[in-house]
Image: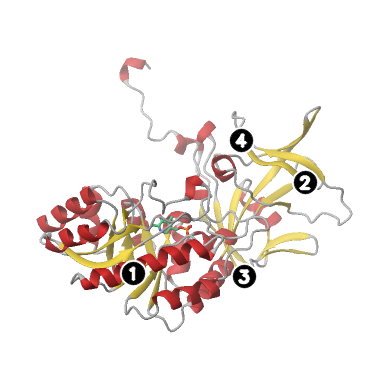
Amino acid sequence: MDNFTYRDGQLFAEDVALADLADDVGTPFFCYSSATMVRHYRVLADAFHGLDTRIFYAVKANSNLAVIRTLSREGAGADVVSEGEIRRALAAGVAPDAIVFSGVGKTQSEMAMAIEAGVLLFNVESEPELNALSEVAASRNATVDMAIRINPDVDAGTPDKISTGRKGDKFGIAWPEARSVYVDAAKMPGINVAGVACHIGSQILDLTPYKSAFEIAAGAVSALREDGHTITRLDLGGGLGVPYDNEVPPSPADYGKMVRNICGDLGVTIMLEPGRVLVANAGVFVMRVIYVKETPGGTFYVVDGAMNDLVRPTLYDAHHTIIPVTEPLESAPLKAVDVVGPICESGDILAQNRDMPPVVAGDLLAMRTAGAYGAVMSSTYNSRLLVPEVLVKDGNHAIVRARPSYDDLWRDEHMPDWCGD
Ligand SMILES: *Cc1c(COP(=O)(O)O)cnc(C)c1O
């Protein structure tokens, strides 16, 4: 469910026509719907009603300050993976004690910054990281709450590049091996053993791997308590999938029920770190057709959006549904085409062999489900400007990230004097 629908033949974001936005901000651009984000947040929160649960939005999915603020106003904390994300969360108004610091490669300076800021919890992913955290905390006379991200060795059945919970993945410490690491952690200065964390991957479309992982995590809580640790937190990570095409992801209600069954009686605060499920369907990427190119090999819709703006199709072979902003006639003949960007890379394909209605140069197209891992993964490759982000609420819109100027592109580049004037 989202708030991008046709009205009288024009695609709207809530009560704003995307064609009007295109006139206002130019193309390409990302457009997000506040109502969709808020709705997804509430549906997820409702699924855990009555259970001691806290939702920490995984900022890396879409770190625009206005997006973070929209969710934090609903009650979300922030799950962050870098100093930059901590600073963003704080800048967006998230309280320090509503921030969880995850990530496999936190540096000591990031740890120090996070301790100064007063974040709630560090999710630690290796013994060297644990040693570093102890050292940094102790040197500041601080004691930090810590959970170990355990690797339950389950296969989430997702593509390799977004799978994180298998033995061979770089994330977490294998369970039960982590049990002895907790023993060491409990003796370390600056460390307060507080919880267990796991996060098995992203775009998960089946509850089975979750169930296996959560059973292992719940078992870990019991085992660690037997070992004498005080475990008050169980972080179940994120990863709930969304429909990009015709996938049917688990419903938040079923997910909540499963968590309740496995973890409801543990007497821990359950922490969730959803990213994609909150924001993916809340965004579209709007682009304009530059040329319709007919070749003996096929038809190409050459558009002004590209892999540098939305890399998921190139990076993950991801499917994003593409629809015209002006609703096509029901009788419009569909034809298999490639939708491609202007970048000098054969991988710059937004959709391949896709049945599309006819378009002409100048038409607007919207790529759906672009709210997560879209703008945050963009680059300026080919010296293309970062794409503006627009947030809609009811009939209002705000440019929440402006398109930079060309001067901005090389503002921080400097000519060494040996290159001459
Ligand atoms: C990426 C990530 C998330 C969010 O994943 P989604 O698939 O977007 O829900 C949550 N927790 C951690 C530790 C992550 O790395």
CA distance separating discs 2 and 1:
48 Å
Q: Is residue 273 visible?
A: no
Q: Earlier in the sequence, mark 3 or mark 2?
A: 2
102 or 32: nearer the viewer:
102
Name the residue beneath numbered marker 3: 394
CA distance separating discs 3 and 2:
32 Å
Q: Judge the density around disc 1: few (<14), some (14-19), many (≥20) Cα neighbours within 10 Å.
A: some
Type of amino acid under label 1: Gly
| 200 with respect to 20 (left or right) | left
CA distance separating discs 4 and 3:
34 Å
Name the residue beneath numbered marker 2: 355
Q: Earlier in the sequence, mark 1 or mark 3?
A: 1
Q: Quadrant of ligand 1?
A: bottom left
| 121 with respect to 295 (left or right) | left
User: Is residue 344 placed above or below 160 in the rendered structure?
Assistant: above
Q: Residue 395 placed where, x, y %?
A: 64, 68
Q: Residue 152 placed where, x, y %?
A: 37, 58
Q: Residue at x 44, y 72 (%)?
A: 73
Q: Earlier in the sequence, mark 2 or mark 1?
A: 1
CA distance separating discs 1 and 3:
46 Å
In the image, which disc is placed on residue 219?
1
Name the residue beneath numbered marker 4: 348
* SS class, disc 4: loop
334 or 305: nearer the viewer:
334
Q: Are marks 2 and 4 in contact (CB under 8 Å)?
A: no
Type of amino acid under label 2: Asp
Q: Are marks 1 and 4 in contact (CB under 8 Å)?
A: no
Q: Nearer the viewer, mark 2 or mark 1?
A: 1
